[in-house]
Image: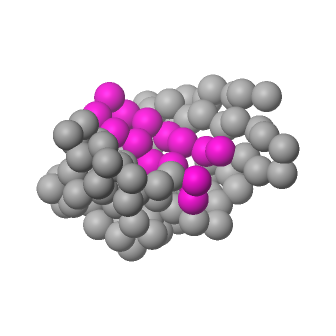
Amino acid sequence: MVTLEPIVVGDHIFLGVEVKLPKTTLLTISTSKGYIMCGALDVGLLNERLKERHIIAGRAVGVRTLPELLAAPLESVTLEAENLGILPGMTGADALLRMM
C-alpha cells in the first residue's frame, strides 16, 4: 500500500510518501530540491556512485512514521545537502526548510 500525504512545516507544504512493504515501511518527505528518508536511504551510494546527480538528501534511522521522520535527527546527509547547511543531527523538519 502506498500513501501520499501533505506535510506542513511552517508555511510550507511538502509531499510525504509511505510505502508499506512486507516487514518494513519506507518513508520519505520531499521538496522540489531534495528529500529526507528513513534508514533505507543509502547516502554512500548517492555520494559516490550517483555523485553527478547532485542529490540533496538526508537519512534518519529508527523512524516508523512520517511525524517521527520530521522530528528525528538526521543520521547522515549527502554532500550536496551539506552544501546547503544541512548537517547530521539536524531534525528532518529543519532540513526540509533548508531545501526550499
In the image, residue 94 above or below residue 61: above
User: For the magenta stretch, what is the residue range?
Assistant: 26-40
Looking at the image, which residue is at 23% across and 57% down?
79
Looking at the image, which residue is at 43% across and 31% down?
13
Q: Is 36 on the left-hand or right-hand side of 27? A: left
Q: Is 1 on the left-hand or right-hand side of 49? A: right
Q: Which of 1 and 72 is in front in this view?
A: 1
Residue 36, given in percent of the width and then of the height, sits at: 45, 48
Q: Can residue 48 be seen in this view?
A: yes
Q: Quadrant of residue 10?
A: top left
Q: Can residue 10 be seen in this view?
A: no
The image shows a total of numbered marks equal to 0
Residue 35 located within the stretch drawn in magenta:
yes
Q: Nearer the viewer, residue 20 or 90?
A: 20
Residue lying at the far bottom in this picture: please name it. Answer: 89
Residue lying at the far right in this picture: please name it. Answer: 22
Q: Which of 5 and 49 is in front in this view?
A: 49
Residue 95, given in percent of the width and then of the height, sits at: 34, 54
Looking at the image, which residue is at 40% across and 42% down?
35
Looking at the image, which residue is at 50% across and 30% down?
15
For the N terminus, the image quarter is top right
In the image, residue 56 above or below residue 87: above
Residue 2, given in percent of the width and then of the height, sits at: 72, 27
Dominant SS in magenta: strand
Residue 90, given in percent of the width and then of the height, sits at: 37, 67
Residue 48 located within the stretch drawn in magenta:
no
